[in-house]
Each structure stands twice: as structure tokens, then as C-alpha cells.
């Protein structure tokens, strides 16, 4: 067996999204949203949706591939894949899983998808309303530690304490996302700009997160079509080649009751080196980054762990002007992302990474050849990926 | 004003159906902090698990540890996500490491003024809170600055 790698073997050739809605506002049920996004991605790729022979998703998506395949009338189902783990940590891994299936001949045309209708189902940001609770949650919920924000705030506080990171560094991440959303008509927060004063005056959700440090909760669906690099050459859009995908977490990351040894972390300590190794790239090669924002503190640690700056430089690096698309040193979350475009569990970030390579972003960065996505900081497993243009192959 | 640190009506902790954590919850009822210690290599294992992550021994015993710790991290919660906490106001969650038990970490509330400054590294001691009239009755382990 030669060198085992996904580098350059597959490409994203189609992207599709529904309209993005505030949570509980979607006019369609979740399954119909998933179907619409998949059909949109197939149309964008110029393929007949019946050619899709694989489905990959994450975070216990409720829309079962067998039902999707039956509903769409696909000719055959060859790959039916779920990345374990909650939050958005599986967003890049799901693309990697699709790529692995194609590269090894298990499938030819895989759709990566995620759909959410939180009016139809439960919201994420609420505590469990049950009389009794057991397992690891029993060590936390009776003390009022229940929601994702509460689960991760202590990691960020510890990191800020260890490295002297100021609140303004988190603020810069929120400001960049909201800035980019103002040129994006798809963004739920389009027309709702954010300035420093509004951020500073906003209420605390849980320290160190103000309201604007937290992702939205939304309804909608998104999908990407992945095929072999060979086949991608004949598709209508410029292919986004997968240069690398990596998922997982470091030593005993899942230790119960907040006992992960490397606690003050976004959990990319081992994942990021694996990512760069497969891609044969280094942080300075990356032209634009979409970094999953469940909370801004997670983005800050993700960028550190992907090597864009050392923790001690966070206050200097994380200034809004460094993160803006047209002029910044590291254009970040150029669609508005989970904070201001839509919380589609980060799949909208993968789509934006593809747009950056196609040159069709509403906040296009200059000369993009290497486009990175990091998914789901602070959960386990996390994942990240790098797309590249043909020139990077 | 509730006689407890947080209002009544929060989820009641109970052991899993495999009883893995049962000795911990029973210990709290008697104002004891019980954790697992590997009888093979002496590693403290927390939270509860069936195997020692250091030496793969299944021989884990429950031992009482001193309720003395240091604040490793903290958060102050302002936005309630449970109906029982609506209108309660802010409260502090702390992650406490136990130097007497290889720095395993435990979660609890920090007692006292909810708007106090919270110094990382400060010494704390355990404060048991017994919910004797709950069904089932249970106890929690909070922390207060020494």
C-alpha cells in the first residue's frame, strides 16, 4: 500500500441550501428541508439526484439515508454514514467520510447534509426538563451546568486566564462575523450590524460569553455533493478539491466531569497537525478560514490550535481589521457563519469555503487557493478540513 | 428564599441503571466525598468508570477523599436555561481540582455572593447540601472559599 491519503482524490462539485430561518420559523418540516437542500446541491452540480449513492451526516441528524434514498428514488444506496458525536464537531469529518468512501470505491456520488427544524424538535440551548438525571449529566445539571454555553465557558475562562486573553479578542470574532453578514443576503442577521458599543452593552449569557459571543439557533438545511476528482473535471463549477480532512481529539478528551487533561483547549491539539500533514501545507498557506462558532472563545482557541498565532498573541491578532475578508490578514467566517448567517450546525461553513474557492462569496477574499474549515470546537470529536483549487494539486 | 443554594425543582441526580456512580451519591448522603482509586496502580479515577485508564485494571475501589481543593476554572451564569432558575439571578459554577487526589476535578457551585470575584487557584472546601425532602432524597457537594 502506498501513502494513504485523501489529498486530491475527491472534490465538492455541488452546494445547496434552503432559505435560512430563525428557529421555529421554517414553513417546512425538517425532512422536507433536507430534501430541498439535497436537490439544490444536485442541481448545482448538474447531476440527476437519482445518481446519489451515498449519504453522510453528523450530530445524530434525524433524516435517515434509507428514507432519503427512497424518497428521492436514487438507483441504489451504497454508503450510509453517521459521524458520532454532538454539536458541529462532525461537519468536516462527514466530508472526510464521504471522501473516504469515494476514494476506496465504496460509493461514487455522496451527499453530505444537515437539516434542522427546531420548532418541530427541541432547541439546543435549553436545559433538560426531567425529574431525575443520571450519568455524567448528574454531576453537572443539579448545579445549573446544563447548556452548551455553560458546558464550555470554563474551558475558555481557563484559557484566557493562562494566556492573558482579553474580552476584546472574543469581541473581534463576533464583529467580523456580523460585518460579513451585512453583505450576505442569505444571512439571518443581514441588516442587523453590530458595533463595539452594542457588543459591550449586551447582556451576559454566561461569563465570558455575551449574547453576541453565542451562535444563533436556526431552521434550514444544507448539502454538498462529493465526487471523485476525475469526475469533477467535467462538472459545471470549478471543483473544490479536498486536500485533507482530520477528526478526533487528544488524550482522554472525553474524560467525564470536565477531567480532560488538556482542559483549556478547543480539542484540536492532535487533529490540526494531522490535518496539515495530509495536506502538505502549513498555516501560512491558508487563504481564508471558516471556523465553527458555537461560542467565540472556541474560535479563538481553534485558531491558536491550527497554528495561526500563539496564544500569547491572541490580543494582538484578534482585531476586527485582521479578520475582514477583503483586507484582513486572515479572513474569517466570511458568510457570517453560525453567529450571523445561520446556525446550520456548521455545514454552511463548508459551503462558504467552497464559495471562496469558486470566487462567489458575498465577502470574497482575494486570490483564494487554500480554504479551511474547522468544525465544532470544544466538543469531541472535532474535525477540520482543507479545500484547494486545481493549482494546489 | 430557598433553603438551598439553587432553587428547588432542578433535576434530581440518581445513579445510572448500571449503578456505576451509586457509591458516590451514597457517600454524599453521609457528607463524604467518595471517588474511585485503582487498586492496581493507585491512580484516582474520576468521574466514575469501570476500568483504570492508566493500567487497564478493573479493580477500582471507592475511597473517601478530603474535601479540600483549588479553583481550576469558573463561570458565572446569567441566562437561565431551566424553568426552576427563571428569575433566580446569577450563580457561579466552579471546577475544583483536588490536590489530595492527583488533581482530579469536581464541579459544584461556589457559595457566597454570586457577584463576587472568583480567583483561579484559590483554596476552597466542600460544603454538603442535603435535600432530605426530595423524592428520592439526594445530596450535593458545593464549595466555599477558605
Image: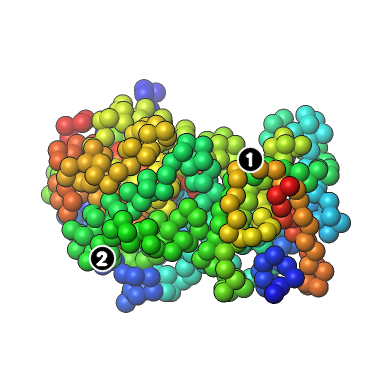
Quarter of the view holding residue A34 = bottom left
Residue located at (78% from left, 72% from top)? B135
Residue located at (24% from left, 58% from top)? A181
- Circle number at residue A192: 2
Residue A255 left/right relative to B24? left
Q: Residue furthest bottom?
A: A27
Q: Nearer the viewer, residue A344 or A17?
A: A344
Q: Is residue A365 above or below residue A30?
A: above
- How many numbered circles are shown? 2
Q: Is residue A313 above or below residue A190?
A: above
Residue B54 left/right relative to A100? right
Quarter of the view holding residue A61 = bottom left
Chain ID of residue with mark 1:
B
Q: CA distance from mark 1 to mark 2?
A: 41 Å
Q: Is disc 2 placed on a helix, strand or loop?
A: loop
Q: Which residue is mark 1?
A: B121
Chain ID of residue with mark 2:
A
Binning the other alpha carbons within 10 Å of mark 2 as few (below 14), some (14 to 19) or many (20 upward) gives few
**Placement of the N terminus of chain A among the 4 image quadrants:** top left
Residue A332 left/right relative to B40? left
Rendered location of residue A331, percent (x, y): 24, 43
Quarter of the view holding residue A44 = bottom left
- Circle number at residue A128: none
Q: Is residue A77 above or below residue A7?
A: below
Amino acid at each position: 500500500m502506498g501513502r494513504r491519503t485523501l489529498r486530491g482524490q475527491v472534490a465538492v462539485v455541488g452546494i445547496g441550501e434552503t432559505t435560512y430561518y430563525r428557529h421555529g420559523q421554517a414553513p417546512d418540516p425538517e425532512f422536507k428541508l433536507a430534501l430541498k437542500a439535497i436537490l439544490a446541491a444536485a442541481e448545482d452540480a448538474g447531476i440527476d439526484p437519482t445518481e446519489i449513492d451515498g449519504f453522510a451526516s453528523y450530530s445524530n441528524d434525524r433524516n435517515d439515508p434509507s428514507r432519503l434514498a427512497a424518497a428521492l428514488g436514487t438507483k441504489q444506496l451504497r454508503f450510509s454514514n453517521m459521524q458520532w458525536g454532538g454539536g458541529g464537531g462532525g461537519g468536516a469529518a462527514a466530508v472526510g467520510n464521504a471522501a473516504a468512501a469515494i476514494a476506496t470505491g465504496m460509493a461514487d456520488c455522496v451527499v453530505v447534509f444537515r437539516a434542522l427544524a427546531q420548532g418541530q424538535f427541541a432547541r439546543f440551548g435549553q436545559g433538560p426538563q426531567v425529574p431525575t438525571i443520571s450519568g455524567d449529566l448528574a454531576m453537572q445539571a443539579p448545579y445549573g451546568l446544563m447548556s452548551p454555553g455553560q458546558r464550555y465557558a470554563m474551558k475558555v475562562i481557563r484559557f484566557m486566564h493562562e494566556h492573558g486573553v482579553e474580552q476584546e479578542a472574543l469581541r473581534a470574532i463576533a464583529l467580523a462575523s456580523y460585518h460579513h453578514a451585512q453583505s450576505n443576503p442569505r444571512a439571518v442577521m443581514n441588516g442587523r450590524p453590530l458595533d463595539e458599543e452594542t457588543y459591550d452593552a449586551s447582556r451576559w449569557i454566561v461569563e465570558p460569553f455575551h449574547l453576541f459571543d453565542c451562535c444563533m439557533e436556526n431552521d434550514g438545511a444544507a448539502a454538498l455533493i462529493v465526487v471523485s476528482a476525475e469526475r469533477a473535471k467535467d462538472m459545471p463549477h470549478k471543483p473544490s478539491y479536498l486536500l485533507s480532512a482530520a477528526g478526533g481529539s487528544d488524550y482522554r478528551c472525553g474524560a467525564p466531569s470536565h477531567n480532560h487533561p488538556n482542559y483549556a483547549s478547543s480539542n484540536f491539539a492532535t487533529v490540526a497537525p494531522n490535518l496539515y500533514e495530509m495536506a502538505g501545507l502549513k498555516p501560512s498557506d491558508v487563504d481564508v478560514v471558516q471556523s465553527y462558532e458555537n461560542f467565540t472563545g472556541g474560535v479563538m482557541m481553534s485558531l491558536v490550535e491550527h497554528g495561526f498565532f500563539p496564544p500569547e498573541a491572541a490580543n494582538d491578532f484578534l482585531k476586527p481589521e485582521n479578520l475582514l475578508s477583503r483586507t484582513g490578514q486572515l479572513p474569517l467566517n466570511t458568510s457570517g457563519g453560525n453567529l450571523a448567517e445561520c446556525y446550520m450546525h456548521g455545514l454552511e461553513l463548508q459551503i462558504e469555503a467552497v464559495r471562496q474557492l469558486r470566487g462567489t462569496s458575498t465577502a470574497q477574499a482575494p486570490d483564494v487557493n487554500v480554504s479551511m474549515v474547522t468544525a465544532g470546537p470544544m466538543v469531541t470529536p472535532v474535525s477540520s478540513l482543507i479545500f484547494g483549487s486545481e493549482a494546489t494539486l | 428564599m430557598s433553603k438551598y443554594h439553587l432553587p428547588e425543582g432542578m433535576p434530581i441526580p440518581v445513579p445510572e441503571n448500571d449503578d456505576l456512580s451509586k457509591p458516590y451519591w451514597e457517600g454524599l448522603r453521609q457528607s463524604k466525598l467518595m471517588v474511585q482509586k485503582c487498586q492496581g496502580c493507585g491512580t484516582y479515577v474520576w468521574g466514575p468508570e469501570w476500568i483504570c485508564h492508566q493500567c487497564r485494571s478493573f479493580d477500582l475501589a471507592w475511597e473517601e477523599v478530603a474535601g479540600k481543593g483549588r479553583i481550576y476554572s469558573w463561570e458565572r451564569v446569567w441566562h437561565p436555561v431551566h424553568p426552576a432558575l427563571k428569575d433566580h439571578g446569577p450563580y457561579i459554577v466552579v471546577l475544583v481540582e483536588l490536590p489530595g487526589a492527583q488533581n482530579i476535578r469536581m464541579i459544584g457551585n461556589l457559595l457566597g455572593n454570586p457577584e463576587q470575584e472568583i480567583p483561579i487557584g484559590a483554596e476552597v472546601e466542600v460544603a454538603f447540601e442535603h435535600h432530605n425532602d426530595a423524592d428520592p432524597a439526594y445530596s450535593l457537594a458545593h464549595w466555599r472559599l477558605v
